[in-house]
Image: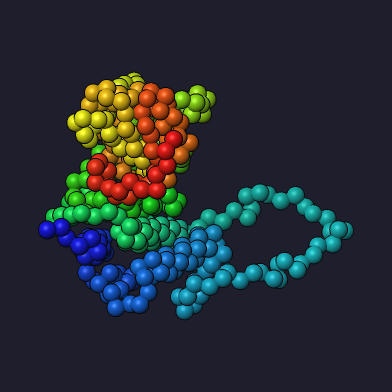
Amino acid sequence: MTADPSSLRQKLADKLWQTLFGGGDSALLPPWRQKSDKRSTAEVRTAELKAIEGMLADLDGLHAGRKVFNSKGELVDAPEDDYISTIKFSSFIEQAEEDPLADLKVPTVQDALNKVRLEAEIQALRHSLNVRRIGLRADMLVETVELEAMSDRAVDADWLLRWKEAAARAVATDFQEMWARVLVDEVRQPGSHNLRTLGWLNTVSKADMTTLRFMMRLDLGGFISLEAAGYFNKDIHGPMFTQMEAMGLLQPDPGKVRIKSVEEKNFRAVLRCQSKALYIEGPDEGSELQLLARPFTALGREISVLFTTGMPDTAYLFALGNALKKRGYHIDIGDWLGRTGEKGLFSEKMSL
């Protein structure tokens, strides 16, 4: 008997929270307390994210000198020195040449230690707040994942420590969303992403992220078809293929990918690309369809799961569909609801 998806999601949310924040007071609203709240998960987590953004803004102000602690230990705006700003020097006053080292201020050891301590505390709090932000994004992500089963096994302590070290340095939203998805996958099924994968993800740059998000919109379930005539531009897509290969995500050479038919008599298959799919019915040429493609490596297939945006490149799908149509296949393009493989619903289709 299949478990209710909503109860599984609640179980996953509870396990995720226990894994990241424990059962104590984390200064955030845990899922089991939120059940009695009338607001949705998205509303609660968005409010908490906004509060954290405010704290980070205060930290930036403290670091830049725009904020200071008053005598009560409260963080306030730094006062402006109005007296100095109103002084005007007469143009008749002769300015003597000054020794540039005369105003050199060498701090005492105690002052230097206090400044270093403050900088370390600011950095530590910033990292802690980053982890909290990603935890909130992961909690919101749980509400959207397709979930058929989950493991009760705990996340490995070494893995969690390595994840926190990497996630703590993630500032941009797209990086935080990536680390949130990694965490959800691992909490759902420990072992989904090994330590080598965490190390690889920790090297991804902003430029890499842009390429990944674009190229994963072409993923047909482990490969990118090269038969989409007229779609690929050598100057635009060529460097992206090279970058993906250099990152170890694509096989070095093109190859033939064989698509098996779901029926024995006539050829029928579904090629899913994010939230869209091509439904292919073809001439009786055997039980498989061969496509020239760039297959993903094992790492590439693992990473592709983290960039399931739901937004395929429809121009690419139409180009591939028309290429197959010229080979004698009947092609429908439509929405795909559900998981990969044969489990799903093909709807809102149109024939090419």
Say which of 133 and 283 sits in front: 283
Q: Is residue 273 left or right of residue 287?
A: right
Does residue 236 lie above or below 2 as drawn? above
Does residue 36 lie above or below 163 as drawn? below
Residue 258 visible within the image: no
At 64% from the left and 53% from the top, the residue drawn is 102
- Residue 22, percent from left and from top: 23, 65
Q: How is the image coloured?
A: rainbow
Tell me how many marks there are. 0
- Residue 186, percent from left and from top: 23, 51
At 84% from the left and 62% from the top, the residue drawn is 90
Which picture quadrant has residue 46?
Answer: bottom left
Q: Quadrant of the C terminus?
A: top left
At 24% from the left and 46% from the top, the residue drawn is 343
Q: Residue at the far right: name it.
A: 92
Q: Quadrant of the N terminus?
A: bottom left
Q: Residue at the far left: name it.
A: 1
Say which of 75 and 105 sits in front: 75
At 33% from the left and 46% from the top, the residue drawn is 346
Which picture quadrant has residue 223?
Answer: top left
- Residue 54, percent from left and from top: 48, 67
Q: Is residue 128 left or right of residue 284?
A: right
Residue 75 visible within the image: yes
Say which of 77 and 294 sits in front: 294
Which picture quadrant has residue 126?
Answer: bottom left
